[in-house]
Amino acid sequence: MRTTHTLTAVALGLALAAGSACAASPKPAPSEFDLRERDWRNGAIVYQVIVDRFVPSAKLEAKRGLYPPPKVLRPWSEPSRRGVYLESEKLNSQELDFWGGDLASLATKVGYVQQLGADVLYLNPIHLAYTNHKYDALDFQQISPEYGTRDDFKRLAAQAHGLGLKVVLDGVFNHMGRNAPKFQDAFKNPASPWRNWFAIGPQYEGGARVWTGFQNLPELNLENPAVRRYLYEAPDSVLRSYLRDGADGWRLDTAFELGHSYLRDLTRAAHTEKPGSLVVGEIVNYPGDWLRDMDAVMNFSLRQIVLGAASGEIAPAMASRMTDRLIRDAGIEPMLKSWMVIDNHDIPRIATQLPKLSQRRLVQALQFTLPGAPNIYYGAELGMVGGGDPENRGPMRWDLLSDANPELVWTRQLIAMRKQHRALRVGNFRTLESERLYAFERHTDKALETVVVLANPTAAPVTERIMIANSSLLDGTPMVNLLETSPGAEAKPVGEVGSGFMTVTLPPETVWVLSPRLPKLGGYNRFKRVR
């Protein structure tokens, strides 16, 4: 009995020790996809706003004195129209048309942005400037009084954060405005302490180096250390102080003109001030090497591929190869953070670019399924139209806001699909073997999270047997089209994967977004040992 008791005690002790060891055993390390999901910059949905044009101010009458002639305060119902050049102002009269929105009025609609499904609120420039677009800064450290104050910005940022939104500001660090006190003093006084902040001399038309010939936009001399300290290096610099005030990142205007070394320094300063902040550059050329300097770019190259495929200027298979090359050159991590732009304040609105509904739907579906962060320009979700600047900068059409608006229904569908499928937010990218379709796959470490995207941008139906080189998609796996699946309804397969192949027939100008489902095999699960 004594021996038995001893063995029992030993066995119990071993069992307790084993249980304790199991309880204390470390959790599995997070996968690369888990880590990507924890970084808000990856695959975020960005909503872009021009503060003056988004929500009319409740204090408009009290603010009228902030718009003295030649500035004009327009009625909200009036569209934005082209103006005439004002020689005395060195700018176009359209740049002095205002609609009266401000940070306080914007704050009343932050909930709308959040409920739409956006993750990031991106504001066009808000600092003190003369024009409506604010790309001609008079003082970066001040907010334009038409918009409010730094305290108003702090309150807006806090409100956005409370709703789970991040806030990104527009950094115009290549130039200031002709009316900036620093420039006026430098231009008129050779002994000015600001003289070397700009490139001034008779070799320049108008007496100073200006951005692409616009006399209202004198360029900053970034080679001057004092300018760099003011903009981003010093703790009280423009970039760092706004990050402390609540900004979560910066979109850099004409980032390519800042140059590689200064972009690297600026990004380092942002990350020092706020780890995990975003620096995304307006790079209109091929992104490649620029993504070594910043977190992300505005992906105009990918935009060209998508629009080229939609218009027939780029063959579908060629578009697939171009996309693959671009992502391999850039790297998937920077690509996930890069903004996928179709329209914005510099580009005609998407409904004007692509008036044909089927083409527009195709482009938007690709915008929300390719790697990156889709950029929604305010009002695009409501079908707002507008050509080039300033027609694309009209006041927000709140009168179009209706649950029955098909553009809004479609945008909500795309956003919901992206939110529900991790692969679309943070998944890797792989092209599919197809000659007649723009075809690719987004995948994670879980087989059933795979998403296959097939686009037929041509005017004729395409039947093709494609190869899906994903060994985790088991034989006989049904595939359903997420864009044709009604909420709550049972999805009907459009085909199945067999030995890595699938035969599809896509109608003209159509995108399928396919997701695998468990085969119905009487409860038997082929994926039981396949993640």
Image (cartoon, rainbow, N blue to C red):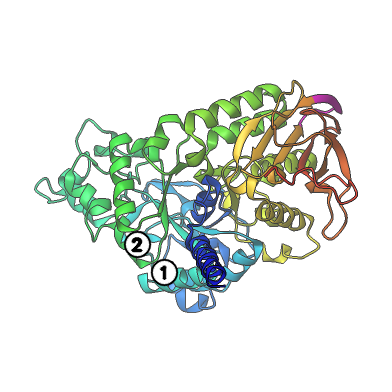
- Tell me the SS state at disc 2: helix
Magenta part of the chain: 456-465
Whether residue 395 appears in magenta in the rendering, the answer is no
Q: Nearer the viewer, residue 12 or 157?
A: 12
The outermost residue toward the left is 191
**Whether residue 467 can be seen here:** yes
Give left or right: position of 88 versus 386.
Answer: left
Viewer-closest of 125 and 183: 125
What residue is at 50 percent from the left and 67 percent from the top?
13
Q: Disc number at residue 153?
A: 1
Residue 503 appears at what percent x and percent y?
A: 85, 28
Quick one: which residue is furthest to the front in this view? 1
**Residue at 85% over, 31% down:** 504
Q: Is residue 219 visible?
A: no
Q: Position of residue 168 (x, y in %)?
A: 45, 57
Where residue 41 sits in the image (x, y, percent)? 49, 52
Q: Amino acid at mark 1?
A: Phe
> The residue tagged with tag 1: helix, strand or loop?
helix
- Left or right, 191 with respect to 506, comes to left
Structural distance between the alpha carbons of marks 2 and 1: 9 Å
Which of the 4 image quadrants contains residue 79? bottom right
Q: Residues within 10 Å of mark 2 (few under 14, many from 20)?
A: many
Left or right: where 92 falls relative to 497: left
Residue 203 x/y as whole percent: 22, 30
Q: In which quadrant is the N terminus drawn?
A: bottom right
For the residue pair 21 and 263, the one nearer the viewer reads as 21
Marks 2/1 in contact by CB < 8 Å: the verdict is: yes
Q: Is residue 288 left or right of residue 187?
A: right
The residue tagged 2 is 242
Q: Nearer the viewer, residue 476 or 488?
A: 476
Q: Is residue 402 positioned above or below 122 on the image?
A: below
